[in-house]
Image (cartoon, rainbow, N blue to C red):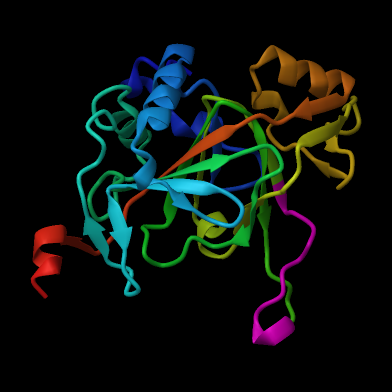
Amino acid sequence: MDATNPSSIDLSSYRIPGHDGCYYLPNFLTEDEEEYLIRKIKEYPQQRWKQLANRRLQLWGGELTSKNVLVAQPMPPWVETYPDIIDRLKATGIFTDSPHGKPNHIIMNEYLPGQGIMPHEDGPAYFPVVATISLGSHCVFHYYQYKNDDEGEAGGRSIDPAPVLSILLEPRSVVISEHALYSSHLHAIREIEEDTITAGNAATPPMLTDLGVPIANTDRLTGPVYCRVMSEGGVLKRATRYSLTYRDVAKVAQLKAFMKR
């Protein structure tokens, strides 16, 4: 795609075949823009990081309350200027019907090699669309569904361990999830340091060797290393990855008004 001309984005041409509601756009950012964003992330004040058990993150635009209200705070000044990611996402049309017509909240996750996130849903606080941009490294993004049985352990719904969709996210790409993939499926990143690929052929697509599941966006990949591994097989080692997740929170309270309550 042309990352410098947001008006040219035709989202329908980036849909993952057979999966309504999943779109993969390679080269959503240029290399210079990626380098700039990573530098700004690293320069952000250390006290703004939140340390979790398996990763750390930053919240841009505010924090959610227990009642799913966004207590709005200003975005970092460079988020809405350069690069113009929000305008590019608006140009895809995915936020046209959202409450604010554009994302108003960004979670920036840092994943070191071997770090990931368990299958989860994003929940009802957000308009049912999420756009995830990858910086610095690839990963494999998995979607899961619940089993048909009513309850799993501890009264919760049990998850089918076999992914229904697996896509490789290249650096500078964006994956967009909407419809059922957002509202009734879960998504996850496995806690591994490398991805081993079994080469595809005329009869079968490239597969994740240990899971035996296909890489669904093989024909959308553009990076020479990733294309070679898809055709020849091999190992892709993960590096530090920064994930920017853009969403629109429906209910918003300004910080000053919230503090007066």
Foreground residue among 180 and 4: 4
Report the magenta residues as a range: 153-165
Q: Residue at x 41, y 23 (%)?
A: 39
Give the image quarter of residue 201.
top right
Give the image quarter of residue 253.
bottom left
- The verdict on residue 230 being magenta is no
Quadrant location, the C terminus: bottom left
Q: Residue at x 45, y 42 (%)?
A: 131
Decide if residue 234 is in sight here.
Answer: yes
Is 62 on the left or on the right of 197, as rendered? left
Q: Is residue 185 above or below residue 236?
A: below
The total number of labels drawn is: 0
- The verdict on residue 154 being magenta is yes
Q: Is residue 150 above or below residue 15?
A: below
x and y percentages locating residue 197 in the rendered image: 85, 31
Decide if residue 150 is in sight here.
Answer: no
Foreground residue among 225 and 2: 225
Give the image quarter of residue 158.
bottom right
x and y percentages locating residue 242 in the rendered image: 52, 35
Q: Is residue 156 above or below residue 78?
A: below
- Judged by its main secondary structure, the magenta piece is loop
Q: Is residue 174 above or below residue 177?
A: above
x and y percentages locating residue 220 in the rendered image: 64, 25
Foreground residue among 42 and 28: 42
x and y percentages locating residue 235 in the rendered image: 83, 27
- Taking the view exactly as shown, the residue that stands out farthest to the front is 47
Q: Residue at x 64, y 17 (%)?
A: 222
Is 150 on the left or on the right of 44, as rendered? right
Is 29 on the left or on the right of 188, as rendered? left
